[in-house]
Image (cartoon, helix red, strand yellow):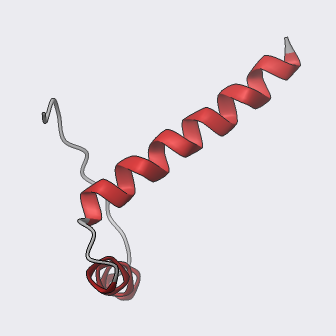
């Protein structure tokens, strides 16, 4: 379920390479980005918890 969007600007070559890899793995780019975001948040939450 889509709740909101996020618009980012990236280099054309980076975007193209990313989409090619996603296609090669038969995975939607949006799904890969969401997974990365979840992993990034989790890793930083772990770091934040150790600081407390």
Q: Is residue 23 left or right of residue 3?
A: right
Occupied quadrant, residue 51? top right
Q: Residue at x 27, y 69 (%)?
A: 27
Residue 30: x %, y % from top left: 26, 57
Q: Is residue 13 above or below residue 4?
A: below
Q: Position of residue 47 (x, y in %)?
A: 78, 30
Q: Does residue 17 appear to the left or right of 41 in the view shown?
A: left
Task: Identify the residue at horizontal 77%, vertical 18% (top origin).
Answer: 49
Q: Position of residue 17 (x, y in %)?
A: 38, 87
| Residue farthest to the top, as pictured | 52
* Viewer-closest of 10 and 31: 31
Tell me: residue 45, above or below residue 52.
below
* Relative vertical location of residue 31 with respect to residue 19 in this rendering, above or below: above
Furthest-front residue in view?
26
Residue 43: image quadrant is: top right
**Residue 10 in the image, given as x and y percentages of width and height:** 37, 70
Which residue is at 73% across, 28% downward? 46
Seen in the picture, residue 44 relative to 18 is either above or below; the reply is above
52 horizontally vs 21: left or right: right
Image quarter of residue 12:
bottom left
| Quadrant assignment for the N terminus | top left
- Picture mark count: 0
Q: Nearer the viewer, residue 16 or 20?
A: 20
Quadrant (top left, top right, bottom left, bottom right) of the C terminus: top right
């Amino acid at each position: 379920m889509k709740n909101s969007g996020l618009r980012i600007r990236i280099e054309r070559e980076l975007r193209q390479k990313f989409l090619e890899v996603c296609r090669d793995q038969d995975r939607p780019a949006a799904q890969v980005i969401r997974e990365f975001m979840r992993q990034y948040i989790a890793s930083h939450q772990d770091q934040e918890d150790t600081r407390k």
